[in-house]
Amino acid sequence: MTTPNTTELEAAAFRRLLQHLRERSDVQNIDLMILAGFCRNCLSNWYQEAAEAAGTPVDKEAAREHVYGEPFAQWKAKHQRDATPEQLAAFEAAQKAHG
């Protein structure tokens, strides 16, 4: 579907995705990687790549802050837990299935 405001609609959907991920800090990046094959860091990398392609470079930390809604180190200290052996095994299996 292409409409005159496709870019605006996509941007609104992306902002809603970021809001949702910020609200669901209980969902770990490894869980996202296992289930969906991408995580918050992937989104920040894609954001950084899009900025570069648009001629407005953004550094890695700024891109992560945009996605996480706060500096990555701060988010990580508050929300990131060590991966469990089960998560690590599931991640490895997912990587093999998609690799």
Image (tube, rainbow, N blue to C red):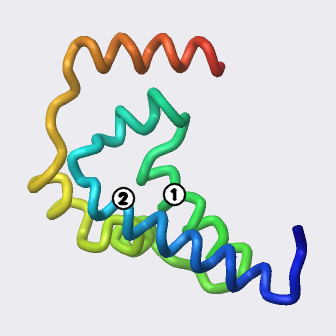
The answer to which quarter of the image holds residue 2 is: bottom right
Tag 2: residue type?
Leu
Name the secondary structure under disc 1.
Answer: helix
Image quadrant holding the C terminus, namely top right
Relative placement, left or right, of 23 versus 40 is left
Above/below status of 54 relative to 60: below
Image quadrant holding the N terminus, namely bottom right
Q: Residue at x 34, y 71 (%)?
A: 65
Above/below status of 43 relative to 11: above
Name the secondary structure under disc 2.
Answer: helix
Q: Nearer the viewer, mark 2 or mark 1?
A: 2
Above/below status of 18 relative to 94: below
N-terminal of the pair, mark 2 or mark 1, is 2
Residues 21 and 98: in front is: 21
Q: Which residue is mark 2?
A: 21
- Locate residue 94, reporting x and y percent: 52, 18
Q: Which mark is residue 43?
A: 1
Residues 17 and 43: in front is: 17
C-beta proximity under 8 Å, tags 2 and 1 = yes
Relative placement, left or right, of 51 versus 35 is right
Q: Residue at x 44, y 14 (%)?
A: 92
